[in-house]
Amino acid sequence: MASFRKHGKIWYYRYVGSDGVKRERKGCSDKRVTEDMARAAESEAARIRSGLSDPRAERMAREGRRPIGEHIDEFIRAMEVARRNAQHVSQTRLYVTRLCGLARVERLADLMPSGDDGRARKASGRGVRDPDRASLRDRDQGVL
């Protein structure tokens, strides 16, 4: 059960999160709406605790629906906030946008290999050193 307090015109609610830690969130000026917000937060925490909901998978799905341009802009803003070299930031933006354009990447999910199209199987054979194959090659070349 959530508890409520009012500070000025704003209601705040406190609930127990999915990890068992008490959390306090800002509601709004309407107590009934704040009660609904608290109920939703408690329900979400209960779903996570019971294993019915995976917050990481939900976040990946939510981020996967956003256009890749938003992710690139967010990344570039993070670089600027971190005070990276301006030339490095502009070159990184150029390279990433060109790469995404050439690869026809529109969403984040387009970057992730899918088991359906075989790209992961093709990529796994390139540039990966197979220890069995390498040992056979070394044996044939007389390397011990």
Image (tube, helix red, strand yellow):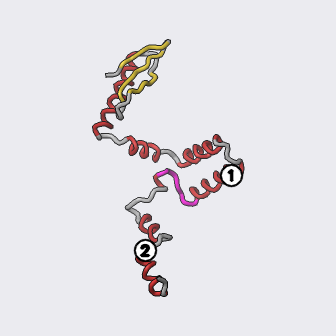
Eye-nearest disc, 2 or 1: 2
Magenta span dominant secondary structure: loop
Sort mark 1 into few (<14), some (14-19) or many (20+) by Cα contacts within 10 Å. few
Q: Position of residue 75 (x, y in %)?
A: 58, 46
Cα gap from disc 2 to disc 1, whole angstroms? 38 Å
Is 58 situated above or below 26?
A: below
Upstream in sequence: badge 2 or badge 1:
1
Please name the residue that numbered disc 2 is placed on: 131
Please name the residue that numbered disc 1 is placed on: 88
- Is disc 2 in contact with disc 1, using a CB cutoff of under 8 Å? no
Residue at 49 percent of width and 56 percent of height: 111
Residue at 60 percent of width and 43 percent of height: 78
In terms of image quadrants, where is residue 19?
top left
Whether residue 44 is visible, yes or no, is: no
Magenta residues span: 102-108
Whether residue 128 is visible, yes or no, is: yes
Q: Nearer the viewer, residue 88 or 70?
A: 88
